[in-house]
Image (tube, coloured by chain):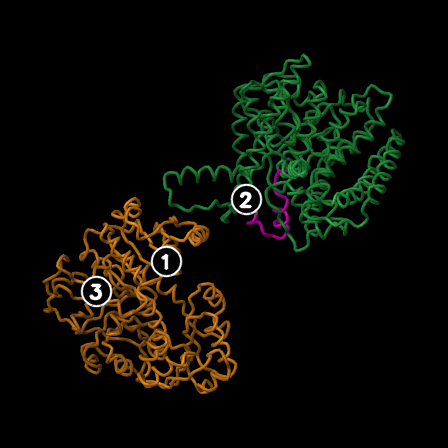
């Protein structure tokens, strides 16, 4: 079977996408002007990206996107976004000691941003070394990547809307595309507006806490910066100490937003229409919130028993205190759906507590949320399928469909989900081995937990891992080979593996 | 009354036959042979044509008709016939449908689609099966006066404890009336001295508690129903499974066709669907057919139903129920060992008959192939029954009428000789077929 795909169409549309990506750079440019730092960096970046976009657009000014072109385009778009996202890092770092001057590092940081992973290779996160504008660009990449750059394109570009469903299906997290309205562009707009609304609400709450005196460090810059990274389950922070830098009030206030970020945004649309029961009866929503409640309770218990000894950041004295519950609730809300913010240096917790957190990272957010990972809905289907297999082994004649929220899951979807989950785990396992071997090659000893967490944190778009990859550590010490593998993992993780691999496999098949 | 019947299939012919004596009946059918047959066999006017066309309906005199009964095998034709008739006539329209989805639509807004009464064949059959399942040992069950009064028919055999007793001895329940005994071809109105014999069918009317109490004296060893196996997933089987699940009765359904089995499993979340041949002995034994309380054969063909019902009974099922499409076979089914044969058309006929008696009867149950009826009647001010003890007023009614129970303002009243019937009472009476019309007129 030959792989006939209209590359020109995909590339042409990519040009249009880049053109608009250049427009988003006006946000950091504005910040640059306000703080009078790095203005030329962003001015030049805009020109470069815009030029590239216009050139690519001319490859096919009237692209016709079919299902295959959609796969190619979506895969390419995310990679290219990460690629051009490096331009500000490289320009700003030129001639400084910034670790982002290295192209591989810049690509890693940019991919980590767009895929809302939150893993960093910045040697030093501080406003002394980097401009406000550069750090806001880093935050902004996560906000753009959260609801999805493709969904945004569908929402605002009429020329994409026609074939939008195919594009959106390739990008949106979760096994199925949910159309909320007859027109896909309208659906995309609804989702982006809800996302936008929550972001604004978050910024207002955070800055409000600052104005009310509960959050001395949460100035407007920080409120906006964190608004850009909380709802997309990103996890980047312009502060080296992440959310631990802020008061307990900020941490408590962030928890509900972290939880919201992992909920299927389509459910909020139903809530807005007054259909609360749609949300309350949704099996995935119930499983997601249930998982948060149970794992928070377990982690609280571990912390009460002293799993997090007095640490420099976010240590917990054993016993029941406000601090215990806050640390437990925050870490769970942040790690379960792949955000990656931290209020405690959990890389220094007891091993059993760390292993528990690793388990929590496997869960992921809901389909249709900004969260990464395998996704709650897939686990539900996988567990129900396993239960069915065990049941039908004992009762071979029984016909038993897999059900979610009362409705039957199509057998093709069941198969697809099982295949995805297996592929995810395989990829995660092989990568952990590769990273471990590759790191040993350059003479650095990596613990099992570190190697496993490096693989999981990147493919799951989580960000922090354990040990040196902890919430206050970084990924700088890895070799270029490992970093490039992780760039790949973040990329396929965000697009849920299938589009990228489908393009690769099909391209290999063609002869 | 002028009645137009669309469709001269089994249902149409049966309904036509039961109405032909007292009413002016016109039957429409597409098939010329059927039309010919009807013309000579029944005292009705048979018209050849399409009942959903305005012209044919006009020909059949729909403009002056009081009632239109659309009972072809095709749901859509029946619905359209009613709707078409409504455009030029005020006739009361009855449509027979198999598919429950139409019934759901119609229940949302009665009178929708131009239909005054929609009769869901499959649902009615399923309902009568489920009613029978709920009462151990019963062959037929019906409710009256919003469930306050229950009618049931039981078979007395060698094994039943009351065989050989007199009615006075067997009747240990306050609020229970022995309305009739169906013995061979005869309808016997029992007195206290009448003896119960092997092979009798006893019709009792009473409060649901006393009827189920009586059921326990007949079948003392039967426990609550906790395992029902439905053999075959045709529309009736599907409805039965749904109704049982609604009542919280665990049930399993066997369907041989993989696609249909898949569909059933998807639409019936509470039912365990098994994909296998319901006549496969090994499979039935593996599924512990001997521990099943009731096996119901709904395979869509009389032969297969008979086979699977007999097979399951032989393999140890507590009771077997089979759907029989051809009413003539009902007796045969029961004679060779099927406990209960349910005829869907009987259920439709009951429902349609209820409406032809609309002026008088609130509810009707047809006993044993139209041999007798149990009727619920609201007593009007000018009735011969009002204000007098039953002992006196009963003399004005034809011989063989039994007043089985009385419902007054939502309470149950036991009819005795000195009970005085009041206006607006609902009485449930038993009457042999020949005297039904006479009885209704007298009341």
Quadrant of the snapshot with the N terminus of chain B? bottom left
Query: Which chain does tag 3 point to?
Result: B
Which residue is at a point 35% across and 64% down the rendered structure image? B125
Q: Is residue A310 left or right of residue B17?
A: right
Q: Is residue A507 left or right of residue B292?
A: right
Q: How many C-alpha atoms fall within 10 Å of the one at disc 1: few (<14), some, or many (≥20)?
A: many
Q: Which residue is mark 3?
A: B176
Residue interval drawn in magenta: A261-278
Q: Can you tell which mark lies on residue A191? A: none
Among the 4 quarters of the image, the one containing residue A289: top right
State how many labels appear: 3
Q: Position of residue A398 (x, y in %)?
A: 39, 45
Quadrant of the snapshot with the C terminus of chain B? bottom left
Q: Position of residue A8 (x, y in %)?
A: 77, 44
Q: What hue represents chain B?
A: orange
Which comes before the other along the chain, label 3 or label 1? 3
Q: Which residue is mark 1?
A: B237
B347 shown above or below B8: above
Q: Is residue A64 left or right of residue B155?
A: right
C-alpha distance separating marks 3 and 2: 58 Å
To the question of a shared chain for discs 2 and 1, the answer is no
Mark nearest the camera among 2 and 1 is 2
Q: Which residue is mark 2?
A: A413
Name the residue nearer the viewer: A281 or B292. B292
Residue A370 visible in the snapshot? no
Name the residue nearer the viewer: A112 or A236. A112
Q: Do labels 3 and 2 touch, CB within 8 Å?
A: no
* Element on which disc 1 rests: helix
Chain drawn green in the picture:
A
Among the 4 quarters of the image, the one containing residue B348: bottom left
């Amino acid at each position: 079977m030959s792989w006939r795909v209209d590359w020109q169409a995909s590339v042409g549309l990519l040009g249009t996408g880049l053109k608009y990506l250049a427009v988003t750079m006006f946000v950091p440019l504005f910040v640059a002007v306000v703080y009078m730092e790095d203005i030329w960096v962003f001015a030049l970046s805009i020109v470069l990206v815009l030029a590239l976009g216009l050139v690519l657009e001319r490859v096919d000014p009237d692209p016709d996107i079919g299902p295959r072109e959609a796969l190619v385009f979506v895969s390419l778009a995310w990679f290219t976004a990460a690629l051009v996202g490096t331009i500000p890092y490289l320009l700003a770092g030129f001639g400084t000691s910034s670790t982002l001057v290295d192209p591989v590092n810049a690509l890693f940081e940019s991919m980590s941003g767009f895929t809302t992973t939150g893993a960093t290779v910045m040697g030093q996160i501080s406003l002394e070394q980097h401009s406000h504008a550069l750090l806001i660009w880093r935050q902004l990449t996560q906000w753009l990547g959260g609801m999805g750059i493709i969904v945004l394109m569908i929402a605002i570009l009429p020329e994409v809307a026609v074939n939008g469903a195919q594009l959106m299906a390739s990008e949106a997290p979760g096994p199925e595309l949910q159309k909320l309205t007859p027109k896909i562009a309208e659906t995309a707009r609804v989702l982006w507006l809800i996302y936008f609304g929550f972001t604004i609400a978050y910024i207002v709450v955070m800055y409000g806490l600052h104005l009310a005196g509960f959050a001395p460090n949460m100035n407007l810059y920080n409120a906006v910066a964190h608004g850009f990274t909380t709802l997309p389950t990103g996890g980047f922070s312009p502060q080296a100490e992440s959310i631990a830098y802020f008061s307990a009030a900020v941490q408590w206030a962030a928890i509900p937003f972290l939880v919201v970020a992992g909920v299927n945004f389509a459910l909020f649309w139903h809530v807005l229409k007054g259909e609360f029961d749609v949300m309350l009866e949704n099996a995935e929503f119930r499983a997601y919130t249930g998982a948060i409640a149970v794992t928070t309770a377990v982690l609280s218990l571990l912390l009460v028993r002293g799993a997090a000894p007095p640490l420099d950041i976010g240590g917990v004295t054993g016993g029941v205190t406000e601090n215990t519950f806050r640390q437990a609730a925050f870490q769970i809300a942040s790690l379960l759906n792949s955000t990656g913010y931290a209020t405690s240096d959990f890389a220094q917790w007891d091993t059993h507590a760390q292993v528990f957190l690793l388990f929590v990272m496997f869960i992921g957010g809901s389909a249709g949320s900004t969260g990464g990972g395998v996704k709650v809905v897939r686990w539900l289907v996988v567990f129900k399928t396993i239960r069915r297999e065990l049941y039908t082994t004992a009762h071979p004649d029984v016909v038993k469909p897999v059900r979610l929220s009362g409705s039957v899951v199509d057998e093709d979807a069941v198969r697809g989900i099982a295949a995805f989950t297996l592929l995810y785990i395989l990829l995660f396992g092989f990568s952990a081995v590769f990273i471990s071997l590759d790191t040993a090659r350059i003479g650095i000893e990596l613990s099992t937990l570190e190697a496993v967490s490096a693989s999981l944190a990147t493919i799951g778009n989580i960000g922090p891992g354990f040990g040196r990859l902890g919430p206050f550590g970084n990924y700088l010490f890895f070799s270029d080979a490992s970093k490039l593998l992780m760039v790949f993992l973040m990329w396929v993780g965000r697009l849920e593996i299938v589009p990228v691999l489908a393009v690769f496999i099909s391209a290999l098949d063609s002869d | 009354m002028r009645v137009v019947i669309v469709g001269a299939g089994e249902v149409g012919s049966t309904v036509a036959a039961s109405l032909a004596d007292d009413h002016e009946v016109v039957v429409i059918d597409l098939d010329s042979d059927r039309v010919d047959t009807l013309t000579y066999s029944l005292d009705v006017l048979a018209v050849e044509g399409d009942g959903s066309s305005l012209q044919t309906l006009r020909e059949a005199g729909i403009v002056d008709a009081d009632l239109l009964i659309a009972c072809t095998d095709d749901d859509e034709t029946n619905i359209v016939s009613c709707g078409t008739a409504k455009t030029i006539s005020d006739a009361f329209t009855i449509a027979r449908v198999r598919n429950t989805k139409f019934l759901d639509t119609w229940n949302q807004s009665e009178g929708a689609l131009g239909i005054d009464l929609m009769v869901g064949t499959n649902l009615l059959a399923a309902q009568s099966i489920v009613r029978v399942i709920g009462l151990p040992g019963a062959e037929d069950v019906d409710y009256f006066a919003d469930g306050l009064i229950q009618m049931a028919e039981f078979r007395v055999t060698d094994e039943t404890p009351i065989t050989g007793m007199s009615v006075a001895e067997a009747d240990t329940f306050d609020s229970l009336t022995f309305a009739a005994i169906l013995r061979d071809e005869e309808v016997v109105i029992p007195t206290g001295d009448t003896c119960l014999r092997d092979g009798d069918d006893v019709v009792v009317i009473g409060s649901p508690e006393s009827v189920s109490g009586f059921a326990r004296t007949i079948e003392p060893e039967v426990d609550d129903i906790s395992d029902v196996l439905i053999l075959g997933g045709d529309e009736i089987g599907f409805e039965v499974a749904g109704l049982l699940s609604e009542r919280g009765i665990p049930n399993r359904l066997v369907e041989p066709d993989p696609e249909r089995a898949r569909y059933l499993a998807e639409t019936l979340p509470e039912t365990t669907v098994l994909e296998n041949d319901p006549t496969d002995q090994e499979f039935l034994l593996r599924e512990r057919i001997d521990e099943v309380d009731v096996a119901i054969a709904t395979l869509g063909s009389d032969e297969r139903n008979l086979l699977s019902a007999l097979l399951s009974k032989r393999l140890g099922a507590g009771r077997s129920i089979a759907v029989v499409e051809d009413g003539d076979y009902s007796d045969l089914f029961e004679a060779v060992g099927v406990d209960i044969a349910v005829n869907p058309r009987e259920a439709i006929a009951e429902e349609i008959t209820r409406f032809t008696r609309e002026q008088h009867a609130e509810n009707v149950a047809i006993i044993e192939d139209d041999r007798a009826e149990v009727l619920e009647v609201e007593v009007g001010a000018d009735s011969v029954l009002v204000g007098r003890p039953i002992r006196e007023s009963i003399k004005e009614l034809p011989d063989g009428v039994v007043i089985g129970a009385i419902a007054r303002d939502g309470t149950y009243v036991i009819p005795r000789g000195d009970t005085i019937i009041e206006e607006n009472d609902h009485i449930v009476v038993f009457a042999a077929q020949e005297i039904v019309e006479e009885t209704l007129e007298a009341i």
